[in-house]
Image (cartoon, rainbow, N blue to C red):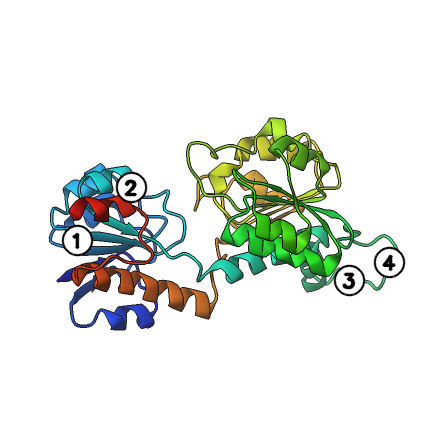
Amino acid sequence: MRIYVTREIPRTGLDLLSAHSVGVYDGRTSMIKAFMKEAIADADALICLLSDRIDAEVLDAAPKLKIIANYAVGYDNIDVAEATRRGIVVANTPDVLTDATAELAWALLFAAARRIPEAHKLVREGRFNGWEPQLLLGQDIRGKTLGVVGAGRIGARFAMGARGFDMKVLYYNRSRNMELEAQTGATKVDISYLMHEADFISIHLPLNRDTKHLIDVHQLVRMKPSAVLINTARGAIVNESDLITVLKAGKIAAVGLDVYEWEPDISEELLKMENVVTLPHIGSATYQARNAMAELCAYAILKVFAGEIPSNIVNREVWLNRR
């Protein structure tokens, strides 16, 4: 079988596929669609990144394709409906990056709330002249209200951290998360109430038609002037133009972003704002998480090649239709 990988991933995954022919793109940026179409023309399996758009045009170029293993937990970059129509399995990497991403959201929260990047820059530039009463004042965290937008695996794990800071937890989700409520005393609320009441808001939703621009100017202006917004999910959940407008007007205190609406392009206005902490989409960037993600992709491919259903299949219906 022939497998194509659109970027170098950890050897732990590639080694599992060594019995097959594996081609790996060695570039440092996303593949141009024309190159990808040529590379996967005779591929039986594809491992792709969240930055790779896998649509009908790409699938037309790969008539032998049996499985697409997405090296990410989100799969908004793949036309799953089209893949299903063609009988192609789609798999992702759930669970293994939950802790890493939740921890990074907390890191962003602390960094934005306590103005860590500004302080780091001040020291490195030689502008630290000693302790000052008014130097880089930030926001307290203990005892505040935490708003969690999306209470799936990552959002719930993130919310669990609030217990260590005696925080009140509000969450917005399609359905109630009874375990989260039992563990933290969290309350399920609508998005407008959460945006108005929370001191810290962290986004953990998948990107789809219902969540794109869920956080727009109408929601952003509900936030407290002292509030902090964190996004480690998908950039387009927040209307970035609206966010810039609200930040320029001084309506919220700070923002921490690991993802961007037009990623990898980032607005110059955002980059110039000192109260915006920017990271290069590293939510899952731990050795443990990235190795496990590679292994999950490899195991999904091997399962399909063996005629078995992967545990991390996204479109289970495609497998049922085979039977």
Q: Residues within 10 Å of mark 4 (few under 14, many from 20)?
A: few
What is the quadrant of residue 126 in the picture? bottom right
Circle 3 SS class: loop
Residue 24 visible at all? no
How many tags in the picture?
Answer: 4
Q: Position of residue 48 (x, y in %)?
A: 29, 53
Mark whose residue sits in front, 2 or 3? 2
Residue drawn at the location 73% of the way across and 36% of the way down: 224
Q: Tell me which numbered mark, 3 or 1, is placed earlier along the sequence.
A: 1
The residue labelled by disc 1 is 39
Q: Residues within 10 Å of mark 3 (few under 14, many from 20)?
A: some
Amino acid on which disc 1 is placed:
Ala
Can you tell which mark lies on residue 80?
2
In space, the residues marked 1 and 2 are separated at their CA atoms by 21 Å
The residue labelled by disc 3 is 128
The residue labelled by disc 4 is 132
Q: Look at the numbered discs 1 and 2 and tell me whether their residues touch, using CB distance below 8 Å.
A: no
Mark whose residue sits in front, 3 or 1? 1
Amino acid on which disc 4 is placed:
Glu
Mark whose residue sits in front, 4 or 1? 1
Residue 126 visible at all? yes
Viewer-proximal residue among 193 and 229: 193
| Left or right: residue 18 compared with residue 314 | left
In space, the residues marked 3 and 1 are separated at their CA atoms by 53 Å
